[in-house]
Image (spheres, coloured by chain):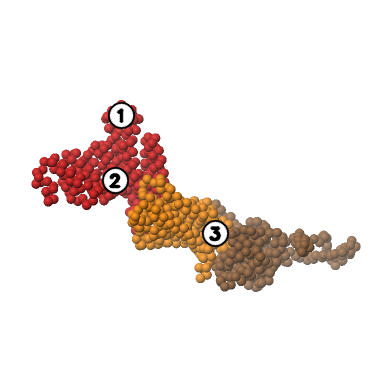
Chain colours: A orange, B red, C brown
Amino acid sequence: MLRLDQILAVCGLTFTEAVRQKFFYIVLLMGAGMLLGAGYFQQFDFGVDELKFVIDFSFGTLFFLGSILVIAASTQLFYSEIENRTAHTLLAKPIRHFDFILGKFFGVQLLMLIFVILLCGLMTVLLFLRVRALPVVEVDGLVHYGEIWLYGLLQWARFGVLSAACLLVGSFARSYLYTMMVSFLFMLVGQLQYIARESHSEITWLPLRWLVQVFAGIFPNLQIFNVGDQLGHMNATGLTSLIAISMLLYAAVYAWVYLCLAWWNFKRREL
Amino acid sequence: MESFILRRLQSWLVAVLLLWLAAFVMRPIERACWQLVQSEQAELRMDSLGKSAGQGVVLGVLGGLRSLVADFAWLQLNRYWEARDRVGLNVLIRLVTRIDPRPEFFWINSARMVGYDVPHWRIATAGGHALLSKAEQGRIIKEQANEALALLEQALNYHPNSARLKVEIGQIYLNRLQDYESAAEWFLRASKEKDAPYYVARIYADLLVLQGKTEVAYTFLKELYLSLPDDPMAQADLVLDRICELEVKLELLSDARFREDRE
Amino acid sequence: MGELAIEIRNLLKDFPVGMRGKQVRALDGLSLEIEAGQIYGLLGPNGCGKSTMMKLLLGLIRPSRGAAHIFGMHAGSLGARRVLGYLPEVPHFYRFLTGRELLNYYSRISGVPRREREAQIMCALGQVGMESAASRCLGTYSKGMLQRIGLAQALLHDPKLLILDEPTAGVDPEGTDGIGKIIRALKGQGKTILVSSHLLGQMERLCDRVAILNKGRLLCEGSVDDLLTREGTAAFVANGLDASGRSAVEAAIEAAGGELCEVAPARRGLDALFSRTIKEETEGMS
């Protein structure tokens, strides 16, 4: 009970601190602006039909801006505690390092939940209005609204992995900039590690092959959350519940492992 | 100092081992999810990743925003086309199709530019149609047609069941290379796809006739006629007329004619 | 000997510097025992190891060798952290919170039960005299107020031991005086206070015992009286003596077999003068 209250206290303060920052609103406004502008950008589209383009673009906005926000927020909200030495006062209290890390993690996740809900909500409304305005009689099924929220949920899970990884980096980093850069690098490697892994069989030079294997083991395959093509649109194949749950489980396990490592490092860190 | 280095090493070792363990445990889950994601995105399941690594990077970094980036790159590509800049055009075609290989529009229109427009630019640069020898013009046309074909065959990696792409390949064989046999082969392939327009099969039959394979064309059209749905777009009458024409050409006796077969 | 609040045995702390991990020694075999119920002063120049020692007691860093205990518990353990309160040298708090919100946050972190929280917050605010400013954002606080609210957060869970790192750093003399009074009051409540400061005059008046550190080593330690009294000497402060009176006193000392070492006018401390002047001005205005 006490531990839960401590975690909630850190979580609440982290969230309060996050929503007080202008950056959150800038990203949120950018996201909303991009979603609202999707119709305008659609005029430049040459490839796919309008709704597919708008869904694609909206998913891309959530994916792209969400990644920036989660890394910036996790880094700022965790590392600033070390840099400003507020962590000194806090950790002199009877709170476990792990609970502190967990509180930070949940605070950022709460922020990201709000971000995802707002953008998915706006996405749903805009698509609903667009569908109604289309010169077609049968509008049902043109957009799978539930899948938009499923995409949001999966991205939120992915943000969780990124946030936990940021906390891990922050637990040993010595500067804010370093934490930020390494976290972004982590995201890029996570998104792209499949390229190295898929070409693994083609690598004949043994040391490089081992290196690729090590890489594939250390970094999660974040590309599995790239399911925008499977969701939302009339012709989308959708995801089975089993696959969706598997993805959430995958994110949860990796987030947990990174949190444990962040705790291990943070506990050993000299403040 | 040793203990300091050892402590650091220890941290890294623990981290790597734990992550390895997580990767090992999660492998079955990750494999199932990954296969599903790959199944919908051709650029993620290329046999030779060397060709698609660039697309993977773009996809990984931009996600859904890549369609917009590709669209803007396409606008730029059109500026090169207007300026008749062959080098720029080729670079932008590669860029656009790598950023977003999903729209067939990019592939087909790029192939048309390469196969139909660029030969004229090259001939004009080399002196014009009047001055340049027919052989040299033919060489240029063939070279460009092959480039366009290579582009469209690359597109088939992403859209293996696209009738439009296959028709486009057939058109290039037909119009640029006058290779009726290959053209016929591609029109036939296209006609077997789900979204194939009805005319594709009729062109295939015409190409067979052009090659002198009138009997094969006649048999094909008969089978086609019987398989056509009750849809005015299918233009069954047109097929029947073609069958009649071929019957005349083949000098078939009235009892061997198709209409009687049906009765 | 009474209960030991802090027990430090042969504490050694090396800090790695740079990528290659070259070591810099911050504490060099420090041993110290602090009895419960005292105000204990840590003195020394910058970099002497005062803050390092405090961080070790808080568990923010680990010793390279040796051990420290707080009321018999390992320094840094959850149990040890439950019985101590800490005020850092420069208290950085969340500027967007009000004083009350900050205390509520720390009371949750300190594990103060929900039903006792409000009372504890009020009590801590009362102890540091910050009730009237409790609803203001920390961003609007002066340095002295920040120190006070910092002290309040250290008191929230009613700890037995208070570790105060330069509690009066950057605070004006009046504020310093106020903090000194709070510390004395806390001692009156039976708390042990470990305090470091550069204000030697204040430490002299405040502390029961002091230790002087330099380069991580303990140079001397003892009660303030023991350390400051020159053995076999006595000081007399006289008022209204003229030249003949002074000669008579000097003669009397000599006659008694003593030796007059120094004759100087009696001076009050500058901090005492400042406090009195301000007090008089304030009283005059009211």
Picture residue at 29% right of the left edge, 41% below the top = B149
User: Which numbered marker is on residue B240?
Assistant: none
Picture residue at 33% right of the left edge, 44% below the top = B107
Which three-letter amino acid code belongs to the residue tagged 2?
A: Arg
User: Which numbered marker is on residue A17?
Assistant: 3
Above or below, A253 relative to B181: below
Q: Where does residue A158 sit, x and y in percent of width and height?
A: 43, 57
To the question of a shared chain for discs 1 and 2, the answer is yes
**Dot 2 corresponds to which residue?**
B164
Image marks 2 and 3: residues in contact by CB distance under 8 Å: no
Q: Where does residue C103 sit, x and y in percent of width and height?
A: 60, 65
To the question of a shared chain for discs 2 and 3, the answer is no
In the rendered structure, the answer to whether residue A112 lies left or right of residue B41 reads: right
**Dot 1 corresponds to which residue?**
B129
Which three-letter amino acid code belongs to the residue tagged 3?
A: Glu
Q: Where does residue C261 sit, x and y in percent of width and height?
A: 81, 61
Q: In which quarter of the image is the N terminus of chain C?
A: bottom right
The residue marked by circle 3 belongs to what chain?
Answer: A
In the rendered structure, the answer to whether residue B244 lies left or right of residue C57 reads: left
Residue positioned most to the top: B131
Q: In which quarter of the image is residue B152?
A: top left
Judge the density around disc 1: few (<14), some (14-19), many (≥20) Cα neighbours within 10 Å: some
Judge the density around disc 3: few (<14), some (14-19), many (≥20) Cα neighbours within 10 Å: some
**Which of these two is toward me, C231 or C35?**
C35
Q: Which of marks 2 and 3 is in front?
A: 2
Above or below, B106 relative to C226: above
Picture residue at 60% right of the left edge, 70% below the top = C118
Judge the density around disc 2: few (<14), some (14-19), many (≥20) Cα neighbours within 10 Å: many
| Residue B15 in view of the camera | no
The residue marked by circle 1 belongs to what chain?
Answer: B
Which three-letter amino acid code belongs to the residue tagged 1?
A: His
